Image (tube, helix red, strand yellow):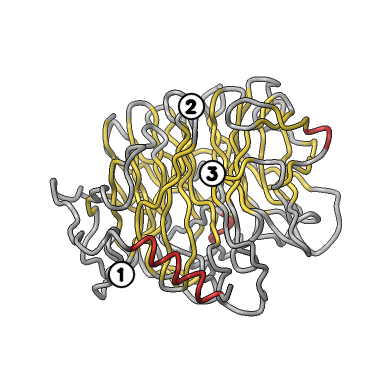
Amino acid sequence: MPLSLFRCRYALLAGLALASITTVTSAKPPPALTTFMQDGGWCWYQDPRAIISNGKLLVGGVSGQTGDVKVSVYDLTAEKDLGTVVLHPNFQVDDHDVPAFYARPDGSVLAVYAKHSNERIHYYRISAPDDYLQWGEEQQFVHDFTGRRGVTYMNLYHLDRPGLLYNFFRDGPTFNPSFITSPDHGKTWGNRTHFISDEVDGTHRPYARYLQRDANTVGITFTDAHPRNYGNSLYYADFRDDAFYRVDGSKIKDLADGPLTTSEAERIFQGSGILTDATVDKSAPLSAWTSSAASDAAGNPHIGYTLYLDDDDHRYRLASWDGTQWHDREIAMGGKCLYPRESSYTGLVTVDPADPRRITISTDVHPTTGKYSGGTHEIYTAQVELDDDITTIKWQALTTDSPDRNIRPIVATGDGYRAVLWLSGPWRTYLDYESDVVGFIEKL
């Protein structure tokens, strides 16, 4: 089927019920916004990019002007900005280098960061337990592989059994999700392991997002490849006790038998499966891309992801497991891509880790109808139940009439607080941005 027919067919089917829906709810006024970090940016394949620990909000970012890797600290009780620390000056102007955080048992915080596939080095520092503006000397874990590609995308998750901290990242030699582990909460690292393997002809890179289902289980949702190269499907699996499982608990295989492949995992959404010419800017039609994932109080995973129809037409979808089956539905219009070369870059959709029914999105069109009114990317939020779809969801605007883009929202929760954060300001490419981290705090 021609690519244009793929796009038109999906757009027609998805849009039939939208003609009479034209409003966004204004039940309450937008919240007052706070700037938590000036001159900061982030990508969305590293987590946690912000955490709450001991009543403090820690926010990571990379300067778009100097390339400094930074952490800003905000006192939630005093409602006061405590300051910003540069973890590594002049690191690299690239929002892929944002640190991931882990709250250690002694009250200190670990920050891990790496360059955008340029080096085989993981950099890390550990804060003082009682002062997040004081950090120990920078340490390095250097891989022994060779080749031009390095590591990127740090993600930190602890599993009580076997008592290890995992850093899930994209490896250099394989271009695939891999991990290293630490037995001492981030002081020392080792055990590089190939975790997920692609099955697309050529060299390709599955994009993975992670969530903590329970103290012993990490959920993984991932794609076949980059959406510029392939019409991605979306997959899911659990990892615990050095083995992979389906969401219902049935075992797939042991990690000792090799990395998980897409054909072994559970497919949630089926993309077009079209392999494209990587020299063109457009993405493959009907190509999914992971955005955010979290588990609810029962441990059920909820996955927010994007779907590419065309450069000017992206859709936000939510896949939720209810303990028996997946509910996968379209929930909002994502609007236009952020710039043509990265035609699947959107404002993104994020799932609240404290309540995955609460969804926050960034879009430059009406979230329900897709109508473009000449504005820029704004932030919206809504409560999305299992039986909701795009025709029933009532979006509340958190920003309006903004002079610059508001993109890439995230939510951090803990200590009875919720921090809703996003990037606001001029943002042109992942190498060229002047955004700040803004948002608001709520008590849970």
Badge 2, how many Cα within 10 Å: few under 14, some, many 20+? few
Q: Which residue is under mark 1?
A: 376
Mark seen at residue 289: none
- Of tags 2 and 1, the one toward the viewer is 2
Query: Could you tell me residue 383's position as x and y percent?
Result: 29, 41
Q: Which residue is under mark 3?
A: 47
Mark seen at residue 323: 2
Badge 3, how many Cα within 10 Å: few under 14, some, many 20+? many
* Three-letter code for the amino acid on which mark 2 is drawn: Gly
Query: Could you tell me residue 174's position as x and y percent?
Result: 79, 54
**Quarter containing the N terminus:** bottom right
| Quarter holding residue 342 | bottom right
* Three-letter code for the amino acid on which mark 3 is drawn: Asp
Disc on the earlier residue, 2 or 3? 3
Disc on the earlier residue, 2 or 1? 2
Q: Is mark 2 on a helix, strand or loop?
A: loop
- Of tags 3 and 1, the one toward the viewer is 1
* Label 2 close to label 1 by CB (< 8 Å): no
Q: Is residue 131 left or right of residue 442?
A: right
Residue appearing at x 72%, y 34% in the figure: 181
In this rendering, is residue 219 above or below 22?
above
**Quarter containing the C terminus:** top left
**Gap between marks 3 and 1, in whole Å?**
26 Å
Query: Could you tell me residue 128's position as x and y percent?
Result: 53, 31
Front position in the image: 243 or 99: 243
